[in-house]
Image (spheres, grey):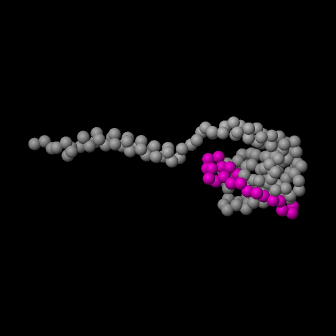
């Protein structure tokens, strides 16, 4: 007497293959729904106008002749004015952007010490590729460059480095 179908290998094997595809597609849908990426901005016109304003900030930094030296050694970041018409002891906004990990992005408000050097002590040392943005506190000018950290010897940031 032959065995019933549910005791044989081939029916279960043929059921298992489509079942794996169904489970994988459900898992893929869950991942896509949880970490969806919005590639199209709803306010694209407003963002385009902001980009033009940002470019004028670079032009203003170039007109003022502003250059700064950035040094990152361990957990300390230092900024020194090299050239330019920055008012003495003006506060600066330092923004650090990681190219692939937005959770590591940060913005810091820096003030100069007695020698005119801006210092920031971080919780952990930075390494790898980072985009560094320096804005005047009044948002009049901006410097921005992509650098590979750490920079013990320093890196010159200028308006043409964008």
The answer to whether 91 appears left or right of 12 in the picture is right
Q: Residue at x 29, y 41 (%)?
A: 15
Q: Position of residue 103 (x, y in %)?
A: 62, 53
- Foreground: 127 or 159? 159
Above or below, 86 against 12 in this view is below
Viewer-proximal residue, 39 or 8?
A: 39
Quadrant in the rendering for residue 104? bottom right
Quarter of the rendering containing residue 92: bottom right
Furthest residue toward left: 1
Establish if 73 lies above or below 139.
below
Question: x, y (%) of residue 64?
Answer: 88, 45
Can residue 152 be seen here? The reply is: no
Examine the image and state in which quarter residue 22 appears. Answer: top left
Magenta-colored span: 96-115
On the image, the x and y values in percent for residue 127 come to: 67, 54
Q: Is residue 103 magenta?
A: yes
Residue 117 rendering spot, x and y as whole percentages: 83, 58
Q: Is residue 70 left or right of residue 101?
A: right
Whether residue 30 appears in magenta in the rendering, the answer is no
In the rendered image, the quadrant that contains the N terminus is top left
For image coordinates 88% across by 48% down, the residue present is 84
* Horizontal side of residue 35 vs 65, given as left or right: left
């Amino acid at each position: 007497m032959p065995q019933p179908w549910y005791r044989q290998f081939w029916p279960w094997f043929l059921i298992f293959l489509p079942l794996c595809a169904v489970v994988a597609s459900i898992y893929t849908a869950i991942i896509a729904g949880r970490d969806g990426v919005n590639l199209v901005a709803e306010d694209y016109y407003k963002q385009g106008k902001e980009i033009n304003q940002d470019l004028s900030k670079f032009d203003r930094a170039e007109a003022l002749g502003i250059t700064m030296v950035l040094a990152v050694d361990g957990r300390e970041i230092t900024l020194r004015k090299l050239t330019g018409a920055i008012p003495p002891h003006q506060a600066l906004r330092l923004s650090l952007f990681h190219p692939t990990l937005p959770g590591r992005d940060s913005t810091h408000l820096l003030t100069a010490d007695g020698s005119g050097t801006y210092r920031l002590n971080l919780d952990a040392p930075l390494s790898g590729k980072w985009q560094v943005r320096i804005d005047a506190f009044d948002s009049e000018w901006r410097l921005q460059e992509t650098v590979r950290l750490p920079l013990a010897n320093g890196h010159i940031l200028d308006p043409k480095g964008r």
